[in-house]
Image (cartoon, rainbow, N blue to C red):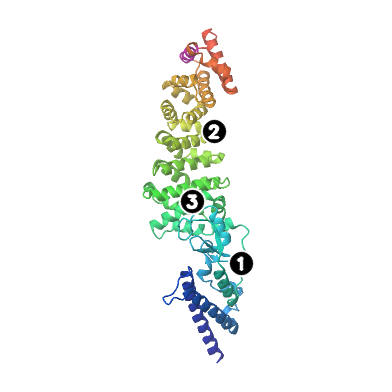
């Protein structure tokens, strides 16, 4: 008999929960205060009925405490399913302070407040909000309170760091949608959302690597698996590469990213293929990674160095600058300079400079590698010294003049043959180029210009050793 009574009570509780769920749906869907066909406020009736059902459910629960699963070590809160209407869609957790925003949607106050610091749209409807104010939703708050009492459910305390909780709670699900997509469209949408999150929120960049297992591999595996067909989905490729760039901005992530065996090959392919933004962001990622000394070696040993040189040649102003800056960082390591030169760097730089493209950035890189004899030999064969003279006569800025005079100095220092010094002497005799630089340049420019003038004097007086 007792078992029969318990079964009947369970059935009654289940029926009440189903009824409550239906009423909650009606209340939320009619939350604008619309009337029924008979002119009465249907939402008011639904609220009253929901309160009656919640009260009844509470009484049923008190008569049948076994429904709370007393044999379990879990608390009552852990064994009760919270109605989705009581959850904030931003956190997927029960609301503590529900508020209504301009779109009419209800959210947890602390989450929507943080959201509105960074967005002007409703998280659910995506519509642009007319204002960023909110008002307490006392109706939903009362319903949640009654439901919690009926189910012996304790509302949790607010988090001390809302930003971390808000913008990282579904990062794992976004990553899973990229790695194991239900469709290409869903995969691309998830990748775009992850790109936006990692761009806006520093805590997401930290969380992504520190808290998620094998996150870098799962992020880029879909592109790596495509092989040479990496650009079959250019939008996905762009979003993933840009996400990788965003994540690399956090200092502690740089080594982890570069040491992943999939990363540098993927960036190399993306330097060659994909949209203009993809190629530029691939170079920007390598630039970001290359600030770490160990990463300089990793990149220099790969095909990425050659791909960066090609992008310097083919890219627009921004892409060329990112690629040149990355190569500059890599070439800070002395042994990497020869690799860059063998990759065809010198003719690419000189041609771009002659064309007036990215002159300041490219001259800085050329000055760095001009300490290598092979670079000097190639510049001499290309007749680049005359272009340097034109730059030195009217430099665009002090740094440009400084880099140009450093290259000329290295050309004189590393090749003291009569032909080269004769050309430099003719420039000085005709335009007084180095005398002017020795008088009004930066400290480094003055030192290099004076050294060049000494070389010229020794050569003209016959005291300079000739070869």
Residue to which mark 3 is pinned: 196
Q: Main secondary structure of the magenta part?
A: helix
Where is residue 421 shown, x and y percent of the image? Answer: 49, 14
| Residue 115: percent from left, percent from top | 54, 56
250 relative to 382 in the view: left or right: right
The crowding category of the residue bearing disc 1, from other C-alpha atoms within 10 Å (few below 14, some 14 to 19, many at least 20), is few
Q: Is residue 313 above or below residue 223?
A: above
Which residue sits at x=43%, y=33%? 343
Query: Which quadrant of the rendered structure holds the N terminus?
Result: bottom right
Q: Residues within 10 Å of mark 3 (few under 14, many from 20)?
A: some
Residue tagged by mark 2?
A: 332
Choose between 129 and 376: the one closer to the eye.
Answer: 129
Q: Residues within 10 Å of mark 2 (few under 14, many from 20)?
A: some
Tell me, yes or no, if residue 86 can be seen here: yes
Residue 156 numbered mark, or none: 1
Is residue 35 on the magenta stretch? no
Alpha carbon distance from label 1 to label 2: 54 Å
Residue 326 locus on image (x, y percent): 50, 37
Is the residue 49 above or below the residue 312 in the image? below
SS at badge 2: loop
Q: Earlier in the sequence, mark 3 or mark 1?
A: 1
Q: Which residues are magenta?
A: 417-428
- Which secondary structure lies at badge 1? loop
Residue depicted at x 48% and y 57%: 174
| Front position in the image: 269 or 42 | 42
């Amino acid at each position: 008999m007792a078992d029969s009574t318990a079964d009947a009570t369970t059935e009654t509780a289940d029926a009440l929960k189903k009824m409550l769920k239906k009423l909650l749906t009606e209340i939320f869907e009619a939350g604008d205060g619309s009337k029924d066909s008979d002119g009465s406020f249907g939402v008011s009736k639904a609220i009253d009925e929901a309160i009656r059902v919640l009260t009844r459910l509470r009484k049923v629960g008190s008569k049948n405490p076994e429904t709370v699963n007393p044999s379990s070590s879990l608390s009552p809160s852990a064994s009760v399913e919270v109605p989705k209407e009581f959850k904030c869609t931003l956190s997927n957790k029960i609301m503590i302070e529900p508020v209504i925003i301009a779109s009419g949607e209800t959210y947890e106050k602390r989450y929507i407040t943080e959201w509105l610091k960074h967005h002007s749209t409703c998280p659910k409807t995506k519509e642009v909000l007319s204002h960023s104010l909110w008002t307490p939703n006392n109706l939903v708050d009362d319903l949640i309170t009654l439901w919690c009492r009926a189910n012996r459910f304790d509302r949790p305390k607010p988090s001390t760091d809302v930003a971390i909780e808000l913008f990282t709670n579904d990062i794992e699900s976004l990553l899973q949608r990229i790695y194991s997509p239900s469709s290409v469209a869903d995969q691309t949408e998830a990748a775009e959302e992850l790109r936006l999150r990692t761009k806006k929120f520093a805590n997401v960049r930290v969380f992504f690597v520190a808290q998620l297992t094998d996150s870098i591999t799962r992020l880029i595996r879909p592109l790596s698996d495509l092989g040479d067909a990496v650009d079959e989905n250019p939008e996905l490729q762009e979003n993933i590469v840009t996400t990788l760039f965003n994540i690399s901005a956090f200092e502690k992530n740089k080594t982890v990213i570069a040491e992943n065996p999939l990363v540098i090959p993927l960036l190399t392919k993306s330097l060659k293929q994909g949209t203009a933004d993809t190629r530029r962001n691939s170079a920007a990622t390598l630039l970001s990674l290359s600030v770490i000394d160990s990463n300089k070696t990793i990149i220099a040993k790969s095909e990425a160095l050659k791909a960066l040189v090609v992008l310097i040649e083919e890219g627009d102003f921004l892409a060329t600058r990112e690629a040149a800056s990355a190569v500059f960082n890599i070439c800070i390591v002395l042994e990497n300079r020869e690799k860059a030169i063998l990759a065809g760097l010198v003719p690419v730089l000189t041609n771009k400079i002659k064309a007036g493209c990215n002159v300041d950035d490219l001259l800085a890189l050329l000055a760095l590698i001009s300490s290598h004899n092979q670079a000097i030999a190639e510049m001499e064969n290309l007749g680049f010294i005359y272009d340097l003279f034109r730059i030195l006569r009217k430099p665009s800025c002090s740094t440009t003049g400084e880099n140009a005079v450093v290259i000329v100095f290295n050309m004189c220092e590393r090749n003291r043959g009569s032909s080269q010094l004769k050309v430099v002497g003719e420039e000085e005799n005709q335009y007084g180029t180095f005398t002017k630089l020795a008088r009004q340049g930066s400290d480094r420019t003055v030192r290099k210009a004076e050294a060049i003038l000494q070389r010229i004097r020794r050569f003209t007086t016959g005291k300079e050793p000739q070869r």
